[in-house]
Image (cartoon, rainbow, N blue to C red):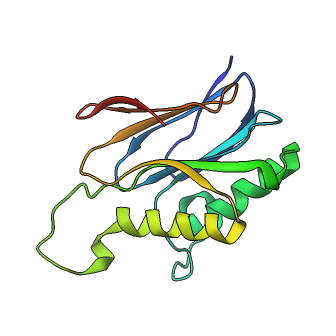
Amino acid sequence: MKVIRVKMADLNVAQSPDMLITSGLGSCVGVVLYDEGKKIGGMAHVMLPDSSSMRNKTNLAKYADTAMDLLLEKLLKMGADKKRLWAKMAGGAQMFQFNSENDLMKIGARNTEAVKKKLKEFNIPLIAEDIGGSHGRTMEFYTETGKVIIKSVKMGDKEL
């Protein structure tokens, strides 16, 4: 089994028996898409919800709207069947408290909403999530089983 690290604002795809892992999920969202029949999956570590107002769009994995398109494209090129894909996601925390009610500062919630919007657009069911709170997470995804383990210093380990 090969362990493939997905960095912040990054994404990658893998096939069984390899494992994808990303750490440092605070307000960022980790998303896994998986084709159980072919045991092909992908993971994205999304930093920001929307690329439309950004001038520099050289890293498409950074934004939910472009990362989800790219991740799906890579999975389909590997042979995944879009009709069989399901998703799991984690992160989207509010790591810092602000005295403002300004939604722009709620990056975690906005990232979560943006990823869910793309999943709905793709008709990919979200079957499990570990979202919100104020703690960091590490996400491990096993392509052999589709199992996702969320590790957190504050909250311990849990399986999605």
Q: Residue at x 19, y 80 (%)?
A: 101
Q: Which residue is drawn at 55% across and 79% down?
A: 55
Residue 23, given in percent of the width and then of the height, sits at 43, 37
- Image quarter of residue 28: bottom left
Picture layout, residue 121 above or below residue 159:
below
Residue 58, given in percent of the width and then of the height, sits at 63, 65
Q: Is residue 31 something one can see in this rendering?
A: no
- Is residue 62 found left or right of 112 in the rendered image? right
The N terminus lies in quadrant: top right
- Is residue 112 found left or right of 82 in the rendered image? left
Picture layout, residue 118 above or below residue 90:
below
Task: Residue at the far left: name it.
Answer: 99
Q: Residue at x 55, y 74 (%)?
A: 51
Q: Which residue is drawn at 71% across and 40% down?
A: 41
Which residue is nearer to you in this view: 159 or 97? Answer: 159
Q: How many marks?
A: 0
Which residue is nearer to you in this view: 45 or 158? Answer: 158
Q: Is residue 22 something one can see in this rendering?
A: yes
- Is residue 21 found left or right of 104 in the rendered image? right
Residue 32, given in percent of the width and then of the height, sits at 60, 45
Picture layout, residue 73 above or below residue 129:
below
Residue 153, given in percent of the width and then of the height, sits at 26, 31
